[in-house]
Image (spheres, rainbow, N blue to C red):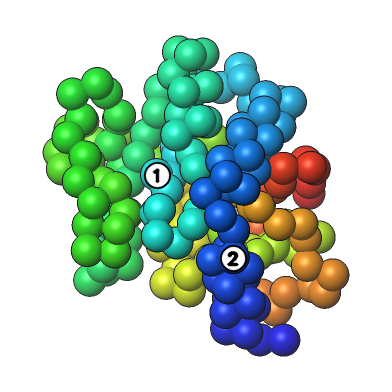
Amino acid sequence: MTKEDIRTIYKQKRQKLNDLQIEEKSIAIANQCLNLPIWDKTYFHLFLSIKHQKEVDTDLLLHVLQGKDKQVIISKSDFKSHSLSHFLLTDSTPLKENKFGIPEPQDGLEVNVTKIDVVFVPLLAFDNNGHRIGYGQGFYDRFLNQCKSTVLKVGLSFFEALREDLEIDQHDIALDYVITPNNIYNF
């Protein structure tokens, strides 16, 4: 299967999930994250969920991070350059959904990517080697390529690993972990 075929299949699988299933699976994923060896780190990059895409609800994980007094960093997308800028999330950070439904900071304290210790990565599907398929724009591959070599990359998925290995491109960055409601994959 091509990456585009897999994208289509997994978008359809997510659209079949109802609100209760998304909530239960997201809670299970947040609870699984508590078992990761990441809690000695300080700076955590978190994607904010696109509700209409039925992504993993990261609000629960945000509460965990805030409860553990971690520094949470969120991104703003530049669709012309396909790049992300990163901001510290505070109580006063103004958020607004962009035209694609992505909640983004409107301004705030910008953070250099080299400070980030852990990145929670959105994905549609992944394989047993830690390779992922996103929406195909390359935002996260470019971002992860700018991070320090020790950054931990944690994918969040409602679904288990693909049975087949994904075709990878030169710019694709493998994940260190993927968390599903039932498993922690360590690559």
Amino acid at dot 1: Leu
Horizontal and vertical percent for residue 60? Answer: 51, 30
Q: Which residue is mark 2?
A: 16
* In this picture, residue 163 sits left or right of residue 76: right
Can you see residue 149? no
Q: Position of residue 137 (x, y in %)?
A: 42, 72
Q: Residues within 10 Å of mark 2 (few under 14, many from 20)?
A: few
In the rendered structure, find residue 48 and report the number of the disc placed on it: 1
**Residue 100 can be seen in this image:** yes
Tell me, yes or no, whether the two marked residues, 2 and 1, touch with CB atoms within 8 Å: no
> Upstream in the sequence, badge 2 or badge 1?
2
Q: Nearer the viewer, residue 144 or 92?
A: 92
Query: From the viewer's perspective, is residue 8 above or below residue 21?
Result: below
Q: Position of residue 35 (x, y in %)?
A: 74, 26
Residue at figure coordinates x 46%, y 29% from the top left: 62
Q: Is residue 63 left or right of residue 157?
A: left
